[in-house]
Amino acid sequence: MPKVTYVQPDGSAESYDVPAGKSLMLAAISHNVPGILGECGGQAMCATCHVYVDEEFLDRLAPLSEDEDEMLDATTSERLPNSRLSCQLICGPELDGLIVTLPEDQA
């Protein structure tokens, strides 16, 4: 099972096993990761699951959809080149060891 590390803005981090096929947002919510709100339930309609993906993993991710790209323009924290919506990142073996950092603010 792939392991994903969620890093808080203060630098604290927790790692969790995430079943293949599950989104990083749903995994974060099921483990009560602070800072991942997922208000729209994973529909790429709210940007409250914004994360910064460790650059080592960017080429392993599915490309941005048009909806995700549009929502990333509406994040409350700065959009960076490695910004993604965790609801759109589906875990698989290629993401084992993934590190994502949460932004200062989601709402």
Image: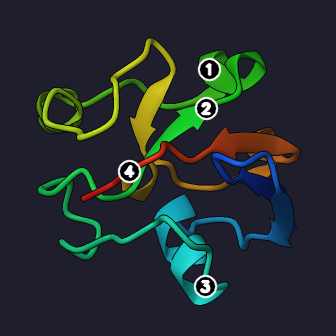
Neighbor class of circle 2 (other Cα within 10 Å; few <14, some 14-19, many 20+) is many
Q: CA distance from mark 1 to mark 2?
A: 7 Å
Q: Helix, strand or loop at disc 1?
A: helix
Residue 105 vs residue 107: left or right?
A: right
Residue 96 vs residue 40: left or right?
A: right
**Could you tell me the amino acid type at mark 3?**
Asn
Query: Looking at the figure, which quarter contains the C terminus?
Result: bottom left
**Could you tell me the amino acid type at mark 4?**
Asp
Q: Are marks 2 and 4 in contact (CB under 8 Å)?
A: no
Neighbor class of circle 4 (other Cα within 10 Å; few <14, some 14-19, many 20+) is some
Q: CA distance from mark 2 to mark 4?
A: 16 Å
Residue 87: x percent and y percent? 39, 58
Residue 76: x percent and y percent? 24, 40
Name the residue beneath numbered marker 3. Answer: 32
Q: CA distance from mark 3 to mark 2?
A: 19 Å
Q: Point out which mark residue 53 bears.
A: 2
Q: Point out which mark residue 58 bears.
A: 1
Q: CA distance from mark 4 to mark 3?
A: 16 Å
Name the residue beneath numbered marker 4. Answer: 105
Neighbor class of circle 1 (other Cα within 10 Å; few <14, some 14-19, many 20+) is some
Q: Are marks 1 and 2 in contact (CB under 8 Å)?
A: yes
Q: CA distance from mark 3 to mark 1?
A: 25 Å
Q: Is residue 34 above or below residue 8?
A: below
Q: Helix, strand or loop at disc 3?
A: loop
**Of tags 4 and 3, which is closer to the observer?**
4
In this view, the residue in front, 107 or 58, is 107
Q: Are marks 1 and 4 in contact (CB under 8 Å)?
A: no
Residue 43 vs residue 105: left or right?
A: left
Residue 23: x percent and y percent? 51, 63
